Amino acid sequence: MSNSTKISIAIVSLGIVLAAGFTVWQGYSVDKKLSATNDNIQKLAASVSVLAQKVSEPEDFESQVINALRSIQNDRMQELIELKEKQFELASNTNNTDKWIYGDIGARFTLVEFSDTECPYCKRFHDTPKKIVDTLQGAVNWEFVNLPLGFHNPAAEAQAIAMECVGLLKGNKAFWMMTDGIFKHTRGNGQGVSDLTALALDNGVDKEEFEKCMASDVARQNVYDDINKAQKLGITGTPATFIVDNTTGKSQVLSGAQPPEAFLSVIRAMTADTGK
């Protein structure tokens, strides 16, 4: 095989690698932010041409092209992870709590959501708490509690465990990134995500560590603890969201995929009761 042929193969391979990345991340609208893909391919073409001139042995050439492709793929993946991290910048990895919290840990109000990633209403509702937290500038945070419903298993339970594993392995921010990814990619109603391991890897988790966590009882027990908590509160459907006033200890639950205005109304009423 001539060097020119190998160059062509290398360039096409890079295109496939980058295209695969875009397929995985379509849900995050990052394709526009990485619109320079063609420029990257052209730059690689130039680099490979120079490399071909320097390498005398075909085996060395092929090895170095493979390494170059892997390096570019890793760089792209890291860039995509960083873009997602920015979307969830309010999810601190230093909140010193065993809860999954998005927003200021010291916020007066907490939206405690019991959710099932296979529930269509939960999927419809998923962006609402984040919008409220992002809008109210530290006054509200959002706590996610897994409640996989029996008729959505085994997919719902497996996804809940996967979210716990990613959080345990990579921290609070990664938990929210994984949760968002599952909601975006699940087919819903028990059909699940096609490849949970791939989705975890897309959030920077080591494959071996993730699979080990999935096989252990630690994350699974966390999910069962959440289910027990829901049962004690009498929650049988999702989404169910408690608006908790952390100042007074009072709370009110709203069931279903309620609009932001419903939560803001409760928050205003609770605020008026205390005059603060």
Image: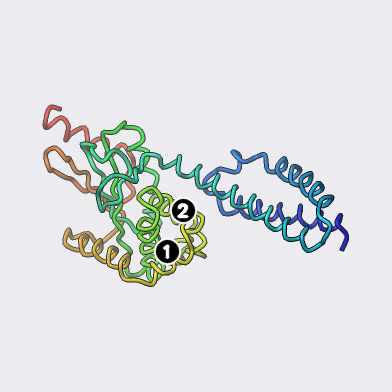
Q: In the image shown, does 131 or 93 lie closer to the viewer?
A: 93
Q: Which mark is residue 181?
A: 2
The quarter holding residue 129 reads: top left
Along the line of sight, the residue nearer the viewer: 260 or 230:
230
Q: Amino acid at mark 2?
A: Gly
Q: In which quadrant is the N terminus drawn?
A: bottom right
Tell whether 166 sits left or right of 75. left
Amino acid residing under circle 1: Asn
Which dot, 1 or 2, sits closer to the camera?
A: 2
Count of marks overlaid on the render: 2
Dot 2, crowdedness within 10 Å: few (<14), some or many (≥20)? many
Q: Position of residue 235 (x, y in %)?
A: 22, 59
Counting from the top left corner in percent of width and height, residue 60 is at 76, 60
Q: Residue at x 28, y 41 (%)?
A: 141
Are circles 1 and 2 on residues that touch, CB within 8 Å?
A: no
Color style of the picture: rainbow
Residue drawn 38% across and 65% down? 156
Q: Find the distance from the CA under tag 1 to the CA under tag 2.
A: 16 Å
List the single residue furthest toward the top.
275
Is 93 left or right of 25, judged from the image as shown?
left
Residue 223 pos. (x, y %):
29, 64
Q: Which mark is residue 189?
A: 1
* Residue drawn at 60 percent across, 43 percent down: 31
Query: Which mark, by number, is residue 59?
Result: none
Label 1 crowding class (10 Å Cα cut-off): few <14, some 14-19, many 20+? some
Residue 37 lies in quadrant: top right
Secondary structure under the numbered disc 2 in the rendered image: helix
